[in-house]
Image (tube, helix red, strand yellow):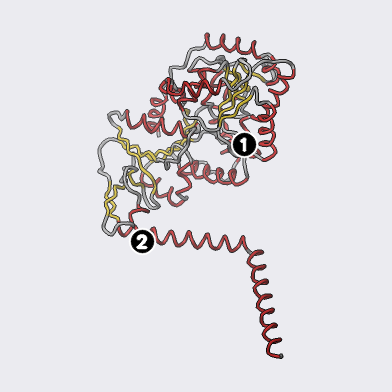
Amino acid sequence: MLGKKVQNLKKQGFRLFLASLSTKLFLNYPSIFKFSLRAYRFFKSVVNRCKLLLVVLVPIEKVPERTIYIVESPNDFQILRAGISKVETYLHAQLKLNESQGFRVIGVHWNGKAFVTSNQQTVNKAGKHCFKKQVAVWSPSQDDLVFFSSFNEYKRLNTKDFRKIKQRCKIVTSVYDILPLTNPEWFKPHMVTSFRDRFAIAWNHSDLLVVNCNYTKNQIQLLVKSEPSLQKTQCEVEVVHLWDVADLSDFLNDSTENKLRQILNSFEYSFPLVIMISTVEPRKGHVELIEAAKAAWSTGAEFNLLLIGQQGWIDAISFNKFHNFLEGFKSRSIWLSNVNDHLLAQLLNSASILVSPSLSEGFGLPVAEALNMQVPVLANAIPAYKEIFGGAVVFYGKGEEFESLVDSLSNIATVIAKGKESINQFTYPSTNTLSELISAFEGA
């Protein structure tokens, strides 16, 4: 009898121990998770360094002409490519296709220790083979340059890596805007922190920053003067316009005609089509647009609204407003999150007007795409738009003919007519994106 009691006490004690252990594990879960993640990263780093023993790094042959090493991002699958992705693809393709005398262009990616030609197997995967693998690695001259067409690859390198690169050649980085620093309220905290770190590296180690308008250039110069963490280096800032990237003519074909008709026929009435092309995020003005559309419709305005763009970072309250708007106005509003470039071009070409209520931009690729297709544009009178598209689009805002987005949409027929007049008087810029970029490279 006594033995059974002892056994029961042991069982109860063991259960209490497990319960206590489980509670401690649960309460300390974040710490355990962080420890496990650090241990995994350390183990992965050791394994990758061991894999380097199976690789023979063969330096790329040095040549008299200057070499541009284009840092290429991983090919992430995207049905509707974001603006930065479009720009990267265009610049990389044009640089490779138009290698001029005095320039050699080589695509590379960072393998953890050096730049390796992008058409070869990465070092990280080389360990799957039990033999030595030759991998072509960069061997720059002092006059060569490494071109980061975005911050996408910055996460693979640290400050120490950039110092080593700068000792061997020049660094050029594209910066499309610095909105996470000037308007952090539009972004998540970790995005602001990440961007601040990357921009600091870009400014402190690049020989040249490429931007797309003078407004962004001026913002950067003001930021450098006021931010102690940014060294007062001799980093140059040059403007390269993106007009050539906005050409969608190659995507205008009949392959999407059925899908196009299906989408347009989804609207209850054949009203003028107002289209917006942008990732759904705070600074793009989606909430402002849907509120203005509701107000305009309540006054009797006749137009359909087509929103195109993937869901980005947006708070739950704002997205619920967006979702409820779509549910409440199914007959005259549609959101398409996944659209390929062919269908995008067809839809834009079928629109009566493009609206861009963005709160701030570094360029505004959809606006340039619309103008290139002779589609009228209604846009917020933000500094970048006024600088780049002044005279070509109908602006709304303080001091403009239309004081607000509600005012504009309430008079949509008048706005479309004025937009057509502006386009007829507008001469598409003769600037050449590639020439401007190469000219900037030559000055680096």
Three-letter code for the amino acid on which mark 2 is drawn: Cys
Quarter of the C terminus within the rendering? top left
Residue on which the image places disc 2: 50
Amino acid type at circle 1 is Thr
Q: Are marks 2 and 1 in contact (CB under 8 Å)?
A: no
Q: Residue at x 50, y 30 (%)?
A: 339
Splitting the image into 4 quarters, where does residue 326 fall?
top right
Task: Examine the rendered structure and indicate whether residue 255 appears above or below residue 35.
Answer: above
Please name which of the two marks, 2 or 1, marks the residue nearer to the observer.
Answer: 2
| Viewport quadrant of the N terminus | bottom right
Element at label 2: helix
Q: Mark 2 or mark 1: which comes first in sequence?
A: 2
Tell me residue 84's x, y (percent): 49, 33
Q: Is residue 32 left or right of residue 373?
A: right
Q: Residue at x 70, y 20 (%)?
A: 406
Figure quadrant of residue 206 = top left
Q: Tell me where residue 208 appears, x and y as whole percent.
A: 44, 36
Disc tally is 2
> Disc 1 designates what residue?
182
Residue displayed at 46% across by 33% down: 210
Q: Give above or below for 71 relative to 348.
A: below
Expressed as whole percent of the image width and height from the top left, the position of residue 27 reads: 66, 64
Closer-to-camera residue (35/335): 335
Packing grade of label 1 (10 A; few <14, some 14-19, many >=20) is few
**Label 2 crowd bin: few (<14), some (14–19), many (20+), radius 10 Å:** few
What's the CA distance linking mark 2 and mark 1? Answer: 43 Å
Can you name the residue that lies furthest to the bottom here? Answer: 2
The residue lying at 48 percent from left, 28 percent from top is 239
- Give percent across and percent down for residue 78: 47, 37
Q: Secondary structure at mark 1?
A: helix
